[in-house]
Image (cartoon, helix red, strand yellow):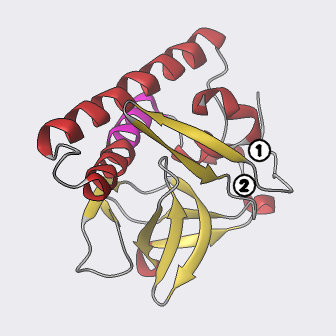
Amino acid sequence: MIRLCVALFAVSVAIPGGAGSVHAQVPTSGDFVVLSHFNVNLRAGPGLDHLIIGRSDKGTLFPLVGASGDWFEIQMFSGVPRYVSKSLCYHLTPDQIIPGHRLELPSNGDSVAALVSAIAVEMDRAARKADTLLPRVFDNEEHETLRLRLVDRNLLELFTERGVQPAVYWLPEAAALRQ
């Protein structure tokens, strides 16, 4: 079983996305946010007026990046800050991680390979959908924002479907997932 390792420094990773990519900082604090309610909205900004990127359920872990008022800033998959209300989750330090949190890669190598392949498919799907909804020729910056939102939404659905914690994506031993 692969267990949690806390990174001591930030590493820049490229997140592919069809027509573009983003360089994201791997979270280094080692702290997490754990959702304490079901059907929690994950937002593009700190406030109810910001777009909902996706929804997740009780027990889901995300790397903690920071805080903004009544909101925790979390790391999803794109590297772009996302937000969750502090009233719907709690802060968890690395020494509070227990086996029930399932903060590990699948133990079967074939499952990891299948997850890596599925991530590539979902990233490509996000890029194609962004191209369809908002072609780059109209507004390249908005296109990229849309693509990254779709990456976060698609990968959240994938990880939930596979029973893998989203926080696993940023563990040092999971670097293959980000290739």
Residue at image point 77% right, 55% down: 10
Q: Is residue 130 left or right of residue 6?
A: left
Q: Secondary structure at mark 1?
A: loop
Picture coordinates of residue 71, whole percent (x, y) = 46, 80
- Mark 2 and mark 1: Cα distance apart in space: 8 Å
Q: Amino acid at mark 1?
A: Leu
**In the image, farthest residue toward the front:** 137
User: Image quarter for residue 40?
Assistant: bottom left
Q: In the image shown, does 80 or 76 lie closer to the viewer?
A: 80
Label 1 crowd (10 A; few <14 / some 14-19 / many >=20): some
Residue at image point 20% right, 37% down: 131
Q: Main secondary structure of the magenta part?
A: helix
Q: Identify the mark at residue 97; answer none if there is no mark.
A: 2
Q: In the picture, which quadrant includes the N terminus? A: top right
Q: Amino acid at mark 2?
A: Ile
Q: Is residue 142 left or right of residue 172?
A: left
Q: In the image shown, does 49 or 166 lie closer to the viewer?
A: 49
Label 2 crowd (10 A; few <14 / some 14-19 / many >=20): some
Q: Is residue 87 above or below residue 104?
A: below
> Are the two marked residues, 2 and 1, in contact with CB atoms closer than 8 angstroms?
yes
Residue 39, visible in the rendered structure = no
Report the residue marked by disc 1: 4
Q: In the image shown, does 134 or 105 lie closer to the viewer?
A: 134
Question: Which segment is the magenta one?
Answer: 154-163
Picture coordinates of residue 134, whole percent (x, y) = 16, 47
Q: In the image shown, does 110 or 28 lie closer to the viewer?
A: 28
Q: Is residue 132 above or below residue 88?
A: above
Picture coordinates of residue 164, whole percent (x, y) = 52, 35
